[in-house]
Image (cartoon, helix red, strand yellow):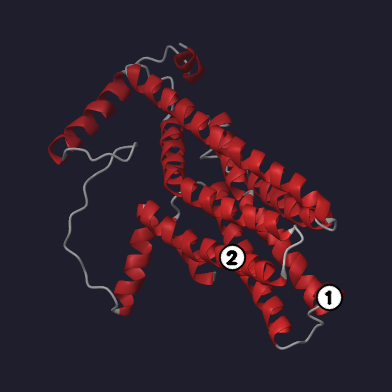
Amino acid sequence: MLFNFIILIRASQFHFNFCCIQGWLFVIHFNDNIAILIMRITMIFEFVDNSNPASSLLFWIPMNVTVACMFAAISTLFFLAVERCCATFFIQDYEINKRRSISVLLNLLLTMFGFGSCFVLTEKENTAYLIVILLVINAFALVLHFLLQWWNRKIYGGLHDYSYLSSYSLTQRFQVAENIKSLQMLNKIIYYMGFMNLIIVLSVLFSSFDLSPELELFITFCLDTAIFVYSFCYPIIMYHSCERWKSEIDSFFKFLGCVRHSSKVHPILNTFGKSMEHANTMSNHFDHLKVSWEAVPRKSVISIVSQ
């Protein structure tokens, strides 16, 4: 977890609030795995009564911690989408004015939702209702994700269609580009998170039924494995999705001597992650700057997008 935190801070791939939610997800995964480990150790070494382990405080506390962390992790995708909504809504000055209270509030709500699930699951009959809520939240996050992509692309296209107007600042232009890049990163991990969320949700749902001891043990094994794989593979997905993240990790392993220095030349990518022709990159860049500086402000960003 500490290593992921260091890479997250050093990479500075995205906005402060977006990174804070990602960092909190690392904390959730770490606590979840520690709680599961404590639960299994107490059961294997028979520190608790296996017929009713929840009667022991040594088992009850980590059990509730893992439930809270699990449901918080499943709903993280929705809160990441909400943060991107804030980035789009406050596009005028979101990069200058960090609005750190947004990430604090979202992480607080995320934690409250996780621990609130513990009280809901005190009755097994409530499990199905909570599962439905989680499925709705994740489905809504998916729809919101693609709507944000469409809207930010429309803003970006509007600004460049009217590139002879300098009514928008470089800050606004940068924020739109960051929104698109972060949403594209989510494109690569959204299917991974959705698949793992589905496995965890189904495992929780089946565990609420009256099953034979063998089948219940199998469901528990599937749930623990899914949680571990979720938390272990998430940084790997980040590594393959974020260039700065990958660069920082590669630099760390090169420092340790585990990876040799590569002379490979990486292509220059545009805002949408597509390769640009190297020969035209510099001339196009200065052409855009020239048009921007010589332009006369006439319309706002909102009026451009509304057309």
Corner quadrant of residue 46: bottom right
Q: Quadrant of the C terminus?
A: top left
Kind of element beneath mark 1: loop
Q: What residue is shown at x 46% (from left), y 40% (from top)?
A: 183
Task: Categorize mark 1 by other alpha carbons within 10 Å: few (<14), some (14-19), many (20+).
Answer: few
Q: What residue is shown at x 40% (from left), y 26% (from top)?
A: 156
Specify whether 278 is left or right of 98. left
Task: Categorize mark 2 by other alpha carbons within 10 Å: few (<14), some (14-19), many (20+).
Answer: some
| Location of mark 1 (residue) | 52
Closer to the camera, 248 or 164? Answer: 248
Image spot of residue 290 (x, y percent): 25, 25
User: What label sits on residue 222 in the rendered view?
Assistant: 2
Closer to the camera, 51 or 178? Answer: 51
Q: Quadrant of the N terminus?
A: bottom right
User: What label sits on residue 206 in the rendered view?
Assistant: none
Eyeballing the image, is 204 above or below 80? below
Eyeballing the image, is 249 above or below 77? below
Amino acid carrying label 2: it is Cys
Distance from Cα at disc 1 to Cα at disc 2: 21 Å
Amino acid carrying label 1: it is Asn
Kind of element beneath mark 2: helix
Eyeballing the image, is 207 above or below 198? below
Eyeballing the image, is 270 above or below 27? above
Q: What residue is shown at x 82% (from left), y 51% (from top)?
A: 125
Specify whether 133 is left or right of 258. right
**Residue 93 visible in the shown view:** no
Image spot of residue 133 (x, y percent): 71, 42
Image spot of residue 150 (x, y percent): 46, 27
Specify whether 225 is left or right of 70. left
